Amino acid sequence: MSPKISAPSVKEHHSMMYTKLVDCAEEILREDGPAALTAGAVAARAGIARNSIYRYVESIDDLRLLVLERYIPGWKKRLDTALEVDAEPYEQLRTLVEITLDIGAEAGHQWLIDVVKAGIGRGKRDEAPSGAQIQARSDAVLNFHRELAGSVVRLWREVTPQAAVVNAQMTRSILDAGLRLLDHGYPAGEVKATALRLLAALVGR
């Protein structure tokens, strides 16, 4: 069956169906896991014919990326808003670390990565896709990580000019470790407190 036009215009209908498909994909992924995301499952949940999906997206794997990408504008806005506050560079670094870990705890950082990896690594069980491979498929993901990394380097150049590169890399390691701990169920408060202590150690506080 073809989807009926239920919006004032074809353009609005397309937008509504696009959003509905991404919503359905995320519901399936969260409820049943990455392996359950098939054209048939999405079509059944959306109430449309299987082939109708491809009027709105090119492939089921594209839906995996779209589920991840839908979170990025909100993440970016939170970070941008925090960095616009008039505060000392070190305090901005603390805020950046806290918000990044908050985002990971709320959205399920590793869950989102696993969702995308399931599509990229299909048929290659021994070849786990890297973060770089995921970013290569999505300009939104790539740009978000670039901006985050750029903000960290810029702030460290103001705090410790001579050790900015080293401290920026260490901060990335702190964030990576923190996100992994959150994914394994460690309490967010404990992870954030430890991350902030490590950050303070980089400036001798």
Image (spheres, helix red, strand yellow):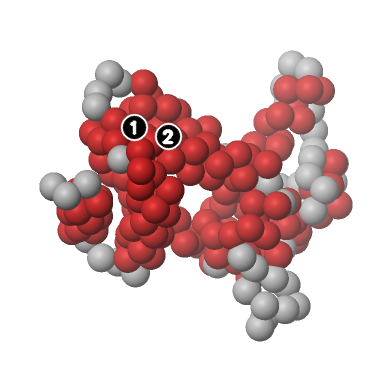
Residue 146 visible at all = yes
Q: Which mark is residue 63?
A: none
Which residue is found at the position 43% from the left and 48% from the top?
165
Position above or below: 13 against 132? above
Q: Residues within 10 Å of mark 2 (few under 14, many from 20)?
A: some
Q: Quadrant of residue 159?
A: top left
Residue 192 visible at all = no
Would residue 66 be found to the left or right of residue 97 on screen? right
Q: Residue furthest front?
A: 162
Position above or below: 123 against 24? below
Q: Pointer 1: what residue?
A: 158
Q: Pointer 2: what residue?
A: 154
| Residue 84, image x, y percentages | 36, 21
Which residue is found at the position 54% from the left and 53% from the top?
27
| Residue 121, image x, y percentages | 69, 71
Would residue 98 be found to the left or right of residue 12 on screen? left
* Amino acid at dot 1: Glu
Q: Which of 58 and 32 is in front in this view?
A: 58
Mark 2 touching mark 1, by CB under 8 A? yes
Which residue is found at the position 19% from the left and 53% from the top?
201
How many discs appear? 2
* Amino acid at dot 2: Arg
SS of the residue under disc 1: helix
SS of the residue under disc 2: helix
Q: In which quarter of the image is residue 85?
A: top left
| Residue 2, image x, y percentages | 85, 41
